[in-house]
Amino acid sequence: MSDTSTTPATGTDGYDQAFRALHDSRLVRKLWAEAMGGQYPEEVDPFSSCCWWLLGQFVAGLRLRPGGTVVDLGCGRGGPGLWLARALSARLVGIDISPVAIELARSRAPQFLADDRASFRVAEFSSTGLEPATADAVVSVDALPFAPDLDAALREIHRILRVGGRLVFTAAQSRAQAPGSAGTWERHLDDAGFTMETRMINAFHHEHFGRLYTLWNEHAADLRSELGEVVANGLLAEAAGADQLDQLDALLVVAQRRPG
C-alpha cells in the first residue's frame, strides 16, 4: 500500500490500478527524479518520500544485526525494503494489501538479492499472518498512517516484533498538536507497548513534494494521457493540497518494543 504517497480510488482495486499505472510510467519516474534531485535513489525507484537521507536514517535507527528479519509493512513495489535487506544483510518479509504491488515486488527482488532472502505476501496491517516475535525490525515508508485501524496495526506490529526490536516509519503530524497529547504518535505508540526513541523532522520532505506537485500540475495533460484519468486525477488532487504541507511536520519515528 506504500511506495506511493497518493491515495487512489477506494479499495484494493484502486491501489492495484495505481501501482500498475505508476510502475509503467516513464514520465512519473522522470518527474520524481527531477523533484528529488541529488537525493533521488534511482535503484530504489521510489514513488514515496524515500530519499538517500531517509534510507540512511532507517539504517541508523534499525540497528539490525546481520541475518535478522525485517518486515516491510505497506511494502508497495518493494524498493525500500529490498534496499535495506541488502544493506543490512537481512531477510525481508514484505506485506501489502495490493496483489499487483506484491507481484511487482517479487519481480524486483532479484535486482537486489541473489538468494531467497525476500518473501512477499498479501495481508492487512492488522492481520499479517506472521508468527509472534517473527521480526527483528519493522519498517514502513509512507504507509502506516493509512492503516484503517491504526491502534490495531500497532498491536499487530507489537505481536510480530521481538522484545527490544525496533519499528521505524514515516508519518505526518499536525504542528498544532503538542508532542505526547491525545492523537499524537507518541500516545499511539505508548498505548501499543512501544517506547519512542527518536522523533525527527524529514527536512527534505516538503521541499521535494512542493517541487513534485508543481511538476505534476505543469504536466497534467501528459499525466492523464499516460496514467489514465483516475490515477492522474488522484495525483493532481494531492497536488491541490500543497498549501497544507506547512501545517504538518514530516516525521521519521524510531520506536522500541517494550516487554509485555
Image (tube, rainbow, N blue to C red):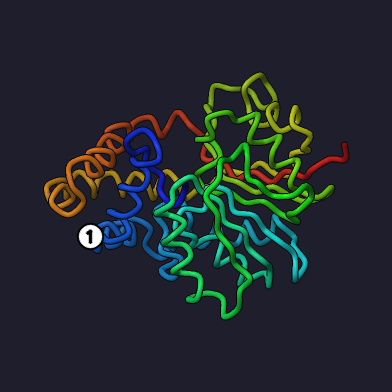
The residue carrying pointer 1 sits among few (fewer than 14), some (14 to 19) or many (20 or more) residues within 10 Å by Cα, namely some
Query: In this view, which residue lies farthest toward the top?
Result: 182
For the residue marked with disc 1, what is the amino acid? Leu
Kindly identify the residue that appears in the image at 63 percent across and 57 percent down.
58
Residue 70 placement: quadrant: bottom right
Q: Residue at x 63, y 26 (%)?
A: 184
Which residue: 32% across, 35% down? 9
Name the image quarter holding residue 12. top left
Residue 194 place in picture, x, y as percent: 77, 37
- Which of these two is toward me, 85 or 236? 85
Q: Secondary structure at mark 1?
A: helix
Residue 102 x/y as whole percent: 47, 56
Task: Tell me the quadrant of the picture where the C terminus can be found.
Answer: top right
Give left or right: position of 152 versus 121: right
**Quadrant location of residue 242?**
top left
Image height of 145 relative to 46, above or below: above
Residue 232 is left or right of residue 5, and the answer is left
Residue indicated by mark 1 = 27
| Residue found at x 41% / y 62% | 104
Answer with left or right where residue 48 lies relative to residue 219.
right
Vertical side of 206 occupied by 87: above or below: below
Foreground pick, 80 / 239: 80
Looking at this rendering, what residue extends furthest in the right direction? 259
- Residue 207 drawn at (x, y percent): 40, 47
Q: Is residue 213 above or below residue 183?
A: below
* Residue 170: x %, y % from top left: 56, 44
